[in-house]
Structure formats: C-alpha cells, structure tokens
Image: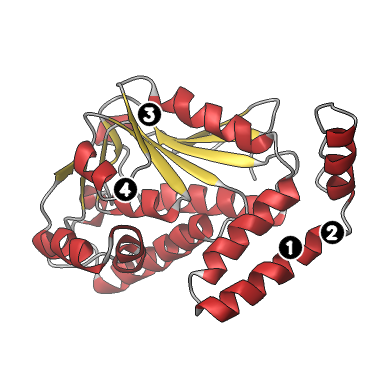
Amino acid sequence: MQQGYETITLETSADGVLTVTLNRPQVANALNTRMGHDLCDVFTALAHAPGAIRCAVLTGAGDRAFCGGADLKERNGMSDADWLAQHVLFERMFRAILDCPLPVIAAINGAAYAGGLEMTLCCDFSYAVRNARFALTEVTLGIMPGGCGTQTLPRTAGERRAKEIILTGEPFSAEQAYDWGIVNRLCEPGEVASLANRTAQRICANAPLSVRQAKLAIHRGLQMDLASGLEFEIQAYNRLVATDDRREGIQAFNEKRKPIYRGR
C-alpha cells in the first residue's frame, strides 16, 4: 500500500480503522482507470498485509456523491480493446473489495449510481445519508452491470427486486434502499462518516481473527447448501481454539477487564 494516491485518500486511526475516501468530487467521484488501480492496490494490500488495520470504511469526498459510476468522459471514444482492458482492471478492483478478509463498511454520503452502487454492494454493509440516491443505470447506456451487481444485488435485495432495479435502470431513494436491505441504517447529511466510524471502532475492539473467520464463514456459507455451510462454520470456528486471542478473551472475562487482542 502506497503512502499517497492520485484519486483516493487514506486515513488510519489509532484503533485500526482505515478510511478510504474516493477523492474526485468535481466529477461526482467517478471511477476512472487511475482510481481502479488505486483501489485495487489498497484492497489487495489489505488482503495480504493488513498490519494494524482491522476494519475499513469506504466513502466519497464532498456531500453530493459517493460515486457516480464509471467516468464516461474517459470512456468516450475508447476502442473496444481499451474498454475491455479497463474493465478487466475494474473487475479486479471490485473483487478485491468483495474478497477483502477485513470488514468493509460503505458510508454513502450522496448518490451511488452504476459502479458506485456496485461498489457499495461489494462492501459488507452500508450506511447512507437520507438524501442519497441509488441506481444501476447500465442498461440505459447499452451495457449491463459488470461490477458484480447482477450477483450481489439479488443476494441482497432478492431476485425480483434486483430484476426491477437492473432492467429499468430507474433511480431509487435511500428510504427504499433501507427498506430493501441495501443499506443498514440512514442518517442525516454530514453524519454518515461518524456513524460508520463508530461501528468500525466497535468491530476493531473485538478479536480480529474471530471477526475475519466469522466474515469468511458467512460469505462462503451463503454459496453452499446448509449442511456444507454448517460444516464450513465449524472448520472456521476450530481455527480459533488454539489462538492466543481466544485464551485472552476468556481470561479477560474471568478477570473482569477489557481484553487486549493481538490477532494471534
């Protein structure tokens, strides 16, 4: 992970929360090729060498948009080959967020359209301001969702709701997103980052290996039948038994003190 990026900013708190901010507010934080590289680098690094980071918050700069989707000005006039090459990068980026072993919370500070909504769906859960708007508009542009949206949205909101959203391309409100399970909580403008950060801090206070194994069990188990999922859950559970953190958690409970987890 680099110290500085062109299209995103990073801020790490003392308790292990990494805030990743999409930083192109002048173009609704649109996803361009450089941002694809930057995000891919960050979330790949979190998978391989998270260091002291225990949870990530993904948000956008400004109060107008979380992410308006792909930068269509950059795409204007692209050859088919260049378009496909860029999309391979975007695919890697979306998968890096989706497969990140650390919890990732989306703090939706404004509009989340197309790839912006797909980005939030690749996070573990999301909070949004009440005036946020959402849409998967790809079919209105002669393409279709290609950032995991046709797979993540049905798993989040159900098949029939996902078909309505994707096939019409019509925007919907934050209240609808909340009712449909796309966002977990709504808040007033200006408060979403602090809400997400408080939740991230609560997660960071828990045993990091336990958090990662629980996330993995949920994510993998949903791709299996129930019996296989239950078996995978126990495999994930058993990996925690011999850890120092498991011993520390039980000892701290019995000593009536706050545990000190070290991720080992």
Q: CA distance from mark 1 to mark 4?
A: 34 Å
Query: If you read the primary sequence from the N terminus, does the residue marked by circle 4 or circle 2 appear first?
Result: 4
The image quadrant that residue 76 belongs to is: bottom left
- Residue 199 vs residue 109: left or right? right
**Residue 191 visible to an observer of this rendering:** yes
Q: CA distance from mark 2 to mark 3?
A: 42 Å
Query: If you read the primary sequence from the N terminus, does the residue marked by circle 4 or circle 3 appear first?
Result: 3
- Residue ID for mark 2: 241
**Residue 68 visible to an observer of this rendering:** no
- Residue ID for mark 4: 116
Which residue lies at the image location 19% right of the left edge and 61% below the top edge? 161
Label 4 crowd (10 A; few <14 / some 14-19 / many >=20): many
Q: Nearer the viewer, mark 1 or mark 3?
A: 1
The image quadrant that residue 187 belongs to is: top left
Residue 34: where, in percent of width, then height?
43, 48
Query: If you read the primary sequence from the N terminus, does the residue marked by circle 1 or circle 4 appear first?
Result: 4
Tag of residue 61: 3
Quick check: 261 above or below 119?
A: above
Identified by mark 4, the residue type is Gly
Identified by mark 3, the residue type is Ala
Element class at badge 2? helix
Q: Nearer the viewer, mark 2 or mark 3?
A: 2
Q: How many marks?
A: 4
Quick check: 140 above or below 135?
A: below
Labelled pair 1, 2 in contact (Cβ < 8 Å): yes
Label 3 crowd (10 A; few <14 / some 14-19 / many >=20): many
Element class at badge 1? helix
- Residue 73 vs residue 241: left or right? left
Tag of residue 237: 1
Q: Nearer the viewer, mark 1 or mark 4?
A: 1
Q: CA distance from mark 4 to mark 3?
A: 13 Å
Identified by mark 1, the residue type is Tyr
